[in-house]
Amino acid sequence: MSSLKQSIADALRDSEQRVREEADKRVKRRKELREKDISAEIRIVAWIDILGFSQQLQQARTEAQYRSVYHKLLLVHEMFDAPSASDQPDVIAKNNDDYGRSVMALSDGLVVTASPNAKARTVMTSYDLLMSFIGDIVMAQANCALNGVFLRGGISIGPFYCENNILLSRALIDAYKMETERAYYPVILISPNHVAALRQLKGFKHYAKGWEPSPTYFRPFKSPSRKKGERFLHLDYLRYLAHPDNHGFFCERDRIESLDREKYSPTERQHLFSLSHFKSAARAMRGHKEKLIQAYKATNSERVKAKYRWLMAYQNRTLRGFHPVYNQARIDLQDFSKA
């Protein structure tokens, strides 16, 4: 009997000891969380929103409609290099890590960031690292638009902290407010002050005059809701889309012809090369035109139609003075005037 009592006493002591140990662990964990270093890193932060996504999601009733919404979101994630949307997630994740980039989904929005302290700084300057990030956003916006997905957003620079599912970032708040309060049309905004700050980074002065590419990334934007003294730029994705240097040959025959030294002189080959790339760029702009018209006709909202009319006017402004091969990409705005 005494042996049984002893066993019970030992079990009680072991139980009490485990309770104390668990309590100590909880106290230690709570202390670690409360005293954790939460120094925020300075990052460039973009908030990206899909035009009309919320309405489309609210109206979805069938599996096919939900799948359409899902595919739209998946496309945007893929264009912004989210590993979860890639068929090579490990490769994309490593590339993002090397370049100090992160991609995070928040409801129907996307938070995309870049750090000036990435591993890639061993092979490129801070300026090139961060400005190439903006250049990639321009390309992503253009590719989304070619697929009929039009984006709105804001870009800011400032503190960014994200760990243990806790996100703290004044830069994200600024980018979000820029998108919701100032980017009335489908544009991604940035402050000229932030662009000027980027141009103070190491690497900008390495470029010879006229060779630094970033001026082509931005276009002045007058927000209908701007306050006195506010100035904004928007990412000029249609300039990127319209430029022949950003496209390949129009067809394989053009490529072969441009390499034929027996049939053509160097001047003729250069002309064939240039004309083929112009035709490719014009084809892309015609595709953008078609997607705009489809989106315009698909909505009954006059408020949304106004946004597409603005994009149509933006397309025409972009093509002023361009080669005649672009003529079919121009839009007759009278066909879409407000009734």
Image (tube, helix red, strand yellow):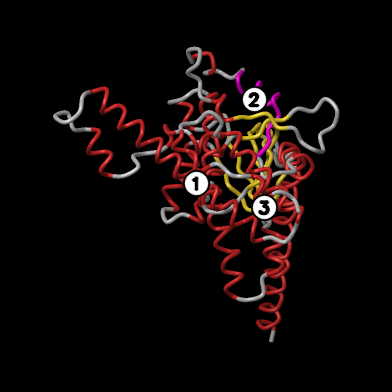
Residue 323 falls left or right of residue 338: left
Q: Is mark 3 on a helix, strand or loop?
A: loop
Q: How far apart are marks 3 and 2 (CA)?
A: 25 Å
The stretch of residues the image draws in magenta is 188-199
Question: Do labels 3 and 2 touch, CB within 8 Å?
Answer: no
* Element carrying mark 2: helix
Residue wearing tag 3: 51
- Residue positioned 14% across, 29% down in the render: 262
- Between 277 and 176, the one lying in front of the other is 277
Where does label 2 land, which residue? 195
Q: Does the segment drawn in magenta span residue 196?
A: yes
Dot 2: few (<14), some (14–19), or many (≥20) neighbours within 10 Å?
Answer: some
Q: In this view, does 148 lie above or below 4?
A: above
Among all residues in the image, which is located at the extreme right? 228
Residue depicted at x 61% and y 45%: 332
* Residue 302 in which image quadrant: bottom right
The quarter holding residue 201 reads top right
x and y percent of residue 291 in the render?
Answer: 56, 53
Residue 133 is covered by the magenta coloring: no
Q: What residue type is labelled 2?
A: Val
Q: Do the residues labelled 2 and 1 touch (CB within 8 Å)?
A: no
Q: Pick whichever, 175 or 138, lies toward us.
A: 138
Q: Which marked residue is nearer to the observer: mark 3 or mark 2?
A: 3
